[in-house]
Image (tube, rainbow, N blue to C red):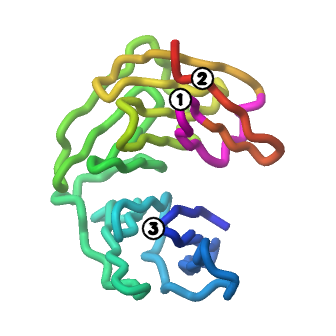
C-alpha cells in the first residue's frame, strides 16, 4: 500500500501498482476497484468529493473528481508547470506542501499563494504533512532529525518534538486537541498546546 485517504464514508487506498481501491466504511461488501492513479504518484489526499494526487511529473497536482462512486478524468489543479519537489501535501481548502522541513508553501486556486520559511528549522526530508479545516496548524514529520514540527498557517513554529520513535512515520492525523503520529509499531499522541 502506497497511501490512503478518506473520501466521505469510503477509504481509498493507493496500491504500489497504481490502483485506486475503494472500501466503504459502512459496508461489509468488501472493496471495489475505483480506477488507476496517474503515473508517479508521490502522495494522495481528498477534499470534498475529489481525490488529489501529487505526482513527480508536471503538472504535479491533479484533481480526480469522484461522482457516484466513479472516478472521473484527472484535471490539472496547478496553473503552472513549474517543478514542485515536494513529496507530501495536505489539504484544507488550500493545498499545503513542504519541499523541505524549513519551507512551507500554501497553494490556493491553482497558484502559489504564500511561501513561508520556518524560523529555526534546519533542512531535512519530509516524511508526512497534515492540516485540517478545524485547526490553524500544519504538522510536519521529518527525518534527520526525526521530529514533529507544529507550525501556524502563518509559518510560525509553535512546537517541536524530537524522538527516535518518529524515524518511520506512516501518517499524521489531527484528533481533538492532539496530533496522532502513526508508526509501524505504535500510534503516539502529541499535545498541540505549546
State the residue position of label 2: 191
Label 2 crowd bin: few (<14), some (14–19), many (20+), radius 10 Å? some
State the residue position of label 3: 8
Residue at the right extreme?
Answer: 185
In the image, what residue occupies the spot 39% across and 84% down? 71
Label 2: element kind = strand
What are the residue bounds of the magenta stretch?
165-179
Q: Circles 1 and 3: CB distance less than 8 Å? A: no
Label 3: element kind = loop
State the residue position of label 1: 177
Horizontally, residue 67 falls left or right of residue 191, namely left
Report x, y in % for residue 42.
Answer: 49, 59
State the quadrant of the N terminus.
bottom right
Whether 168 is among the magenta residues is: yes
Q: Earlier in the sequence, mark 2 or mark 3?
A: 3
Horizontally, residue 67 falls left or right of residue 76, namely right
Quarter residue 134 falls in? top left
Q: Circles 1 and 2: CB distance less than 8 Å? A: yes
99 and 5: which is toward the camera: 5
Report x, y in % for residue 88.
Answer: 47, 49
Q: Circles 2 and 3: CB distance less than 8 Å? A: no
In the image, what residue occupies the spot 66% across and 27% down? 146
Report x, y in % for residue 64.
Answer: 34, 74
6 and 98: which is toward the camera: 6
Q: Earlier in the sequence, mark 1 or mark 2?
A: 1
Quarter residue 49 falls in? bottom left
Whether 173 is among the magenta residues is: yes
Q: Earlier in the sequence, mark 1 or mark 3?
A: 3
Label 1: element kind = loop
Residue at the front extreme?
Answer: 26
Amino acid at each position: 500500500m502506497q497511501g490512503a485517504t478518506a473520501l466521505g464514508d469510503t477509504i481509498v487506498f493507493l496500491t504500489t501498482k497504481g490502483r485506486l481501491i475503494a472500501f466503504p466504511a459502512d459496508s461489509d461488501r468488501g472493496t471495489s476497484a475505483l480506477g488507476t492513479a496517474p503515473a508517479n504518484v508521490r502522495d494522495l489526499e481528498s477534499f470534498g468529493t475529489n481525490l488529489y494526487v501529487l505526482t513527480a511529473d508536471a503538472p504535479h497536482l491533479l484533481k480526480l473528481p469522484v461522482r457516484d462512486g466513479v472516478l472521473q478524468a484527472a484535471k490539472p489543479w496547478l496553473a503552472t508547470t513549474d517543478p514542485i519537489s515536494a513529496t507530501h501535501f495536505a489539504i484544507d481548502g488550500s493545498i499545503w506542501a513542504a519541499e523541505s522541513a524549513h519551507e512551507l508553501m500554501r497553494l490556493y486556486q491553482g497558484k502559489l499563494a504564500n511561501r513561508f520559511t520556518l524560523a529555526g528549522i534546519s533542512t531535512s526530508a519530509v516524511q508526512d504533512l497534515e492540516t485540517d479545516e478545524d485547526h490553524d496548524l500544519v504538522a510536519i514529520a521529518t527525518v534527520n532529525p526525526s521530529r514533529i514540527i507544529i507550525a501556524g498557517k502563518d509559518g510560525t513554529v509553535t512546537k517541536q518534538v524530537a524522538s527516535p520513535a518518529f524515524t518511520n512515520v506512516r501518517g499524521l492525523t489531527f484528533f481533538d486537541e492532539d496530533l496522532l503520529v502513526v508508526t509501524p509499531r505504535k500510534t503516539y499522541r502529541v499535545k498541540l498546546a505549546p
